[in-house]
Image (tube, rainbow, N blue to C red):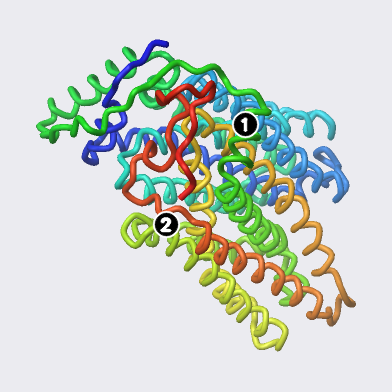
Amino acid sequence: MHVVRSLVPARMDRLPWTRFHWLIVVGLGVSWILDGLEIQIVSSMGGQLENAQTLHLTSGQVGATASWYLAGQVVGALVFGRITDKLGRKKLFILTLAIYLIGSGLAGLSWNVWSLYLFRFIAGTGIGGEYTAINSAIDEIMPSRYRGRVDIAINGTYWCGAAIGAAASLFLFNEHYVPVHWGWRIGFFIGPVLGLIIIFVRRQIPESPRWLLTHGKAAEAERTVDEIERRLQSQGVELPPVDESKALDIVDTDQLSYVQMARIFFGRYPSRSFLGFTMMVTQAFLYNAIFFTASLVLIHFYKVPSDHTGYYFFPFAVGNLIGPLVLGPLFDSIGRRKMICATYVGSGLLLLASAWAFDAGILNATTQTVFWCVVFFFASAGASSAYLTVGEIFPLELRGQAISFFFAIAQGAGGVVAPYLFGHLVGGGDNANPDRLPLTCGYVIGAGAMIFGGVVAWFFGVNAEGQSLEDIADPLSMAKSSDSLPSPAVEG
């Protein structure tokens, strides 16, 4: 058995924050902006797609376009999650972005409903694959003391894309500015234009040295880190020496079978798997419940004209964007477990308060939106921490597949069930004076889900702040005694 001794992970973790890390943030963080842009623009073009001058879809067909996109995300995450663990991060975050560009661009050329479904599905597979490859790369490249805040902030930029999409929709879908038969097609081209620009940035991003090290490419991993360090030193950055005691002994391992993966997830890491499942599903349920029905609430209960709901979305998006930026550093200083519990439980309690105020009828459209902004200031940071947690608590060789597995479960459970459930709750009662009780009960359920997620994080969370990924979970390729499958670290 060939054993390689390496300091690559320790060398990556001791790097100071530099322009190289900003390159990673810009080059990889755009994925969430694109996803937010896509979902917001498509959710705003329903009226355009129903128009006789366009595809003349029914309301059900318009809603189905989101379902096809979501299905594509789930398939893309599961397929590309396994591939990125086998072939590397860089190959996949170039490939998945290209797939998104093609799918979204072709959607703008759709000629009927089925072609639109197909192209939305393709675009979804690209974004789903992006989530797995990019979260993996970010966690593996960022220094341990910055990993939490960077990962949380990048995941939160989804709302920057959503805000851009909302602004674009006010122009594109206004017949006074853009003809109705062109507005929806142009909307599908905005994302690909941004993606074409960023794909050139990604070509400058190296492969994850950690992935190279654990996949029989130790020499390439060393060269990659050497090059990063040379760049920094040429900029006058002084690098501290590396503690030799942090060296890892790595052996070659084959790709794991699904049976071996199940043994690791549920046999060796059962509490971590329960934690990841709970965090991902509860945040997805809350987000999809509120986000996909917010405009319906404004229209049905506060009599906001349908073409004015976009104006209420801007502060909602800003609250979601600011939350991870402000609270993100606290996940590295105060700690993961405490902050996850605080953001989940805090957002749940605030949602309970808003449910009481909603049921009492003391809110208007503005104060309801303010409540949502405050709730999701905390919930957005908590939701982003779910992706961070799943990405860092499992062995490196499983990172992409872990993210894809829990992402698919979350989207399937929270992504499908919540909008369907809350859509029916909003529709209760007569239109002139709709019954508030069903939706109030829905808000209580959503609040309870988030509080439950926070409690689970308190008892099962991992204090991963400031720790090397290899200290949180031993790589499966780490040299051990006589085990045929190297054993990961004991849960903790």
Q: What kind of residue is marked 1?
A: Met
Where residue 180 sits, quadrant-wise, is top right
Q: Which of 313 and 325 lies nearest the eye of the viewer?
A: 325
Image coords of residue 219 (percent x, y): 31, 12
Q: Secondary structure at mark 1?
A: helix
Image coords of residue 336 (percent x, y): 42, 57
Q: Which residue is drawn at the image coordinates 41% and 33% (left, top)?
A: 27
- The vertical placement of 35 against 4, above or below, is below
Question: Circle 1: is it few (<14), some (14-19), or many (20+) Cα within 10 Å?
Answer: some
Q: Is residue 293 left or right of residue 394?
A: right
- The vertical placement of 381 against 87, above or below, is below
Q: Which residue is mark 1?
A: 261
Q: What kind of residue is marked 2?
A: Arg
The residue lying furthest to the front in this view is 482
Q: Which of 419 and 434 lies nearest the eye of the viewer?
A: 419
Between the residue at mark 1 and the residue at mark 2, the CA separation in whole angstroms equals 25 Å
Q: Nearer the viewer, mark 1 or mark 2?
A: 1
- The vertical placement of 101 against 417, above or below, is above
Q: Which residue is drawn at the image coordinates 39% and 34% (left, top)?
A: 140
Quadrant into which the N terminus falls: top left
Question: Circle 2: is it few (<14), some (14-19), or many (20+) Cα within 10 Å?
Answer: many
Where residue 475 sits, quadrant-wise, is top left
Q: Earlier in the sequence, mark 1 or mark 2?
A: 1
Q: Secondary structure at mark 2?
A: helix
Q: Is residue 43 left or right of residue 231?
A: right
- The vertical placement of 366 against 78, above or below, is below
Image coords of residue 370 (percent x, y): 54, 74
Q: Which residue is drawn at the image coordinates 67% and 48% (left, top)?
A: 410
Q: Which of 241 and 346 lies nearest the eye of the viewer?
A: 241
